[in-house]
Amino acid sequence: MLLAARAVGTCIFMVSTGRDKALFYFRLLARSLPLLNKTIQESLERSISDTGNPWTSELSGTEDPWSLTPHCEYVMYLQLHSIESSLHSPFSDVADLENELRHPSGAPIGRIPPLRMSLVAWSPDCSYFLESKGPPHYAAIDGQHLVGMKDEVYTYTASRMLLTFGAVLLGQLWLLQTQIRETSTPSTKGRVSFYTASMMLLADGIIFSAASAWSLSAIASLLPVLVVSFASLMLMTLEGNFLRDVYHIQTPQRRSRTRPTNNTPRATTPPTAPAENNNNNTLPQPVTAGPPRVASPPIIIPSDQDIDAEIAEATAAGAAAVPSAPPQTTTTTTNAQPAIRSFSQVVTFLFLIGTVLLFITAASSSWAVTIRTLYRNIITFTYFSMWVPQIVRNILRNSRQAFSWRFIIGQSTLRLVPFAYFYLYEDNFLFVKTDARTFCVLLGWVWCQFCYLRFQDVLGPRTGIPKFLHRWLPEVWDYHPLLKEDNIESGLLPIGLSKCDDSPGRGARSGSISQSSTKTTDILGAGSSSSSSGERDRERDKEAERSGIKICCVDCIICKEVLEVPVVKQGAAEPAFANPVAGLFARRAYMVTPCRHIFHTECLGGWLKVRLQCPICREALPPL
C-alpha cells in the first residue's frame, strides 16, 4: 500500500512538473527506496516486539506490569459560569473584588460567592468522556457542576479561622494563669491529676508543632500562623511549669506507693560496763583515787515515781538486787529507694508521643475514608476524656475541687470550639467531612464528666462507687462522719461536743449532749438558723424526736462563729432519713479532723488549701 501510494504520487508529480524533472525524481527514488523500506521494517519490528503501551501517559513509555492502576491522560474543557457579585458582596464589579483579594486593603468583602464551572474531560488513552451535571440540562439535585472557592478566597478564609483559633488559645492561656494563681500551695497542687495536665500539654504541643511546620511554607497566611504558634508556645510553656511543680510535689506520694520494705528483726543487747581489771602487773592507782566502783546495770524508773527515793532503795538493797533490763529486740527497716523517673524523662516521653501522633495524623490523610474517620473520632474522644484522670484521683485520695469550675468549663468550651468548626461547618478550610451526630455524642460525653465532677464536689468524692469496691480503695479519713452520743466513751466524739455540758450560756440553741440541755430538731434544719416559733417548730421537734437527732452548738476556732452539729441520741439507731441527700448536706456543714477538732466546712477547707495542719494542735492532717 505504501508503494502504491508513492506510485500515485509519482504520476501526479510527472503530470505537474514535466518529463525531465520526473526522470530525475525516479532516479532519486530508486536510490532512497531501499533505505526507506529498511527504516519502515525496523520500526514495525520494534513495535511488534515492544510489549508496552504506546498510548501510555508514562514518560518512559512503559508501565509497571505489577501495577494494576490505569494511567489515563485527560484533555479537559472548563467553562466558567457568570458571578453575580452584587448579591453577595458590596463590590459592584468582579474586577474590584478580584483586586481586593489579590491586594487586600482592609475593605469589607462580605460573603464571597463560590466559583462554578462546567467540565468535559476526554481521555485519549482510555477512550471515554466525563461530564459534570447541573443546571440547565440537569436538575440541581443531580449536581451543581464544579463548585469551589478561589485560591485567594481560601487563603482569606484560612487566615480568618487561624486568627480566631489564636484568640481561643489566648483565652485558654488566661484561664490557666488564673488557675495557677489559685493552685499555688502544695496542698492544692497535690489534688491535681498529673495525667489531666499532661493531656492538655500534649495537645498544645502538637498544635505548636503543626503551626511551626505550616509557617515554613506559608506565604499569604504567615502572620495568622505565627499568632497561633506564639499563643500555643506560651500556653505550652506555662503548662510545662505547672506540670513540673505538680510532679515534684506528688513525687513523695508515688515513692511511698512503690517503695519495697524489708523488715528484719535484730536482737540488740544493752551496753555493759567494762570489767574490773585484776591484773597485778598494772601500775598502782593514785593515792587520791577511791576504791573501784562496781558496775551496775541501768535502772528503769517510771516517770511518776520519785527518782531519788528509788536510787536510795536500790543502793541499800545492793546493785545486784536491781533487775537488769532484758535484751531488746528491735526491727530495722531497710528501704530500697525505687526508681522514680525524673521530670525530664517524662517530658521526653510526652515529646515522643506527640511526634508519633503528629506523623500518624499527617499520614491518615491518604487512608480510606472509613478508617480515617474512625481514627479521628478515637483521637477526639480520647482527648476530651481529660477529666477522667481527675475523677479517678478524687476517688483514690478522697479529695475534690482540684480545679475551679471556671477553669473546667472554660477550658472544655474553648477546646471544643475548633472541633465544632470542623464537625459542623461544611466549608471548613481543611475540607473535613462534617458529622453532627458524632459531635453531639462528644458533647454528651463531656457533659457526663462535668456532672460527675459536680457530684463529687457536693456529695463526696466516692459518690456512686459500690460498697464492695471500697475495700480495694485506699483508706482515707472521712471529714464528715455521722456523730453519735455512743462515741463519747470510745473517744470518737469531737472534743468540743464531749465537753458541751461544762459550757453553759450558749443561748437558745446552745446545749450539750444531755437530754435536758439540748434542743431536738430535725436533721434537715442542721447548720441553719432557728426557725420561727409556732406550730411549725412543734412539728419539727416532734419529727426530730422520732428520728433521734438533736443539735449541739460549739464554737468554730477559725471564724469564731457558732457551729450547729447534728448528733444521734444515745442508744438510738442510725436514723433512716426520708431524704438522704438532705441528711448528707447537713453533714457537709461541719468537718471533724483526726485529732477530734471540729470546724465549719468552709473554714477548714480554706485552711487546708494553705496548710495541712490542724489550726488548734498543729497535728498533720490528711489532704482534703
Image (cartoon, rainbow, N blue to C red):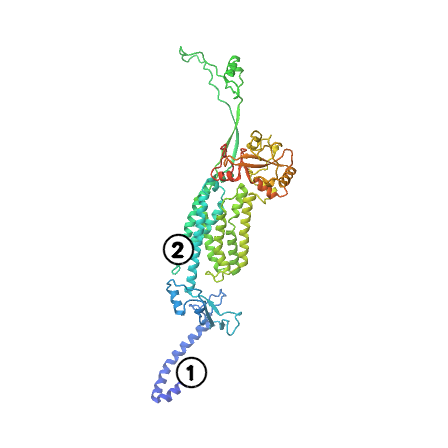
- Give the secondary structure at mark 2: helix
User: The residue under label 1 is which amino acid type?
Assistant: Leu
Residue sitting at 43 percent across and 63 percent down? Answer: 154
- Give the secondary structure at mark 1: helix
**Left or right, residue 325 beside residue 282:** right
Query: Which label is found at residue 299?
Result: none
Query: Which label is found at residue 3?
Result: 1
Q: Can you give x and y, in whole percent of width and height, for residue 128 in the image?
A: 49, 73
Q: Can you give x and y, in whole percent of width and height, for residue 102 in the image?
A: 38, 65
Q: Residues within 10 Å of mark 1 (few under 14, many from 20)?
A: few
Choose top left, top right, bottom left or bottom right for residue 482: top right
- Residue at image mark 2: 226
Q: Residues within 10 Å of mark 2 (few under 14, many from 20)?
A: many
Against 76, residue 172 (above or below) is above
Q: Nearer the viewer, mark 2 or mark 1?
A: 2
Q: Can you give x and y, in whole percent of width and height, for residue 479 in the image?
A: 55, 38
Q: Tell me which label, 2 or 1, sits earlier in the chain.
A: 1
User: Does the image show residue 534?
Assistant: yes
Residue placed furthest toward the front = 534
User: The residue under label 2 is which amino acid type?
Assistant: Leu
